Image (cartoon, rainbow, N blue to C red):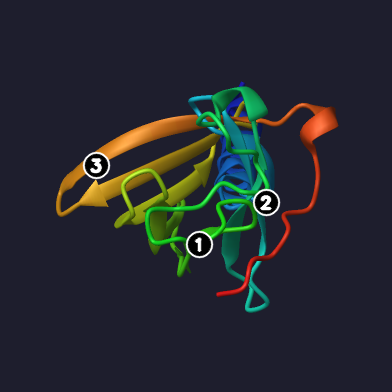
Amino acid sequence: MMRSVGLAACMAMFSAAAQAEDSHNVYGTFLTQAKTSTVTIEDCGDGTPCGRVSWIDPNAMEPGQTPETAVTQAGDPVLGLLMLQGFDKKRRDWRGGTIYDPENDKTYASRLKRLGDGRLQVKGCIGPICQTQVWDVAPAALQTSAPTSDE
């Protein structure tokens, strides 16, 4: 009996460690909560995640716009836009980064965490108040590398 309790405790520790490790694997292509665009998250080159807009639903565009011609309020192309950056790896998630909202041309403090079901939890914060979104893994047809825009 004691041996099975010890084994169960040991397995629980390894499971918790595996979950903590998985929460940092935020890389991939995700369909945003509104389901009108995808963001591809890749390594910035320094071991931290960077996310770029990699697809925009043509049906979500303003009349006369295409995904290729869509621009932010600041006039930058939306496709390929760097919108997630500057994160620090913490115990359970990525923190200290920023998320840019091209719809209102504002940047917010951000946190990222991969959930156990594979989806991505994205938080945008102003001070202590955060809004949380959960992004689904993008369907295979939308799994592309993000184009880069001139910055």
Identity of the residue drawn at 49% across and 27% down: 33
Which label belongs to residue 130? 3
Identify the residue position indicated by label 1 in the image. 76
* Residue 112 coordinates in the image, percent (x, y): 47, 49
Q: Amino acid at mark 1?
A: Asp
Callout count: 3
* Among the 4 quarters of the image, the one containing residue 80: bottom right
Nearest to N terminus: mark 1 or mark 3: 1
Determine whether, in the image, residue 101 is placed left or right of residue 40.
left
Which label belongs to residue 20? none
Identify the residue position indicated by label 2 in the image. 27
Identity of the residue drawn at 61% across and 55% down: 52
Identify which residue, 38 or 94, lies in the foreground. Answer: 38
Q: Secondary structure at mark 3?
A: strand
Determine whether, in the image, residue 103 is placed left or right of residue 19.
left
Quick one: label 2, few (<14), some, or many (20+) residues within 10 Å? some
> Alpha carbon of mark 2 to alpha carbon of mark 3: how far?
22 Å
Mark 1 or 3, closer to the camera: 1
